[in-house]
Amino acid sequence: MSKSVEFFFDFGSPTSYLAFTQLPAIAQATGAQIIWRPLLLGALFKAIGNQSPVSLPAKGRYMFQDMARFAKRYEVPLKLNPFFPINTLQLMRGAVAYAGTPEFERYMQAIYQGIWVQQLNLGDAQVLAQLLTEAGFNPTEFAAKIADEAVKQQLKDNTDEAVKRGVFGAPTFFIDGQMYFGQDRLDFVAAALKAE
């Protein structure tokens, strides 16, 4: 019986981006299913009294150096976004809206690439609309989708559930009830998915 891995993420997290570049291949290699769990990191931090690592200058400097090492190891592009931190509320609602649809993977790729490769300010409505258009999405349809009350509520529910389950940042993974935090723990995620 194949396992599943829950992936709690926010587009505004560069480490979530790094995890996103690796997790699908891990899931494919282990025959696992990814359960995508978009959350709002800012709301999570507020609920538990946490804050971004970059709020501590020394920790922020180290974290960016470490992420560059992992990007090199993974052989993926990573560019620090000059508009960081970006308000990801609309982007995360979009992830909820497209989850389970054929457009989901394309949406994920477009948004992550936009922030962490193209260095775009996706908190700007015009910039976001242009990116969505270039990726084959209709910005008007996108706006309607993220205005849906059920989509808004699902993002809130995901974030609330994450708080209740002990999540304190992103990316966070759950396999068989066990929590793994950080893209630098993907080796443990892979091992857990392989385990009988």
Image (cartoon, helix red, strand yellow):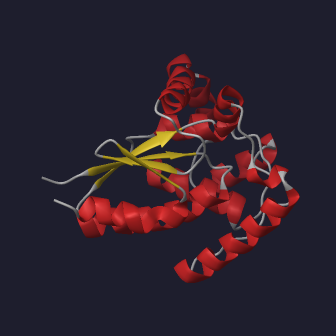
User: Residue 149 lies in what quarter of the image?
Assistant: top right
Above or below residue 171? Residue 163 is above
Q: Residue at x 51, y 35 (%)?
A: 166
Query: Between residues 56 and 37, which one lies in front from this camera angle?
Result: 56
Residue 68 in percent (x, y) is at: 69, 75
In the image, 100: left or right of 107? left
Q: Residue furthest left?
A: 1
Q: Position of residue 170 (x, y in %)?
A: 58, 48
Residue drawn where x is 66% and y is 26% of the image: 47
* Residue 189: quarter of image: bottom left
The answer, for residue 129, to whether it is visible in the render is: yes
Residue 182: horizontal and vertical position, in percent?
54, 57
Q: Please state the horizontal and vertical placement of residue 158, each as a whole percent of the image.
A: 50, 30
**Residue 102 drawn above or below residue 82:** above
**Quadrant of the snapshot with the C terminus:** bottom left
Look at the picture and state if 58 lies above or below 42. Answer: below
Horizontal relation, residue 41 to residue 58: left or right: left
Q: Is residue 172 left or right of residue 113?
A: left
Q: Can the viewer see residue 24?
A: no
Q: Tell me what residue is drawn at x 65 percent, y 79 percent.
A: 69
Which residue is depicted at the point 80% across and 44% down? 126
**Front-most of residues 104 and 4:** 4
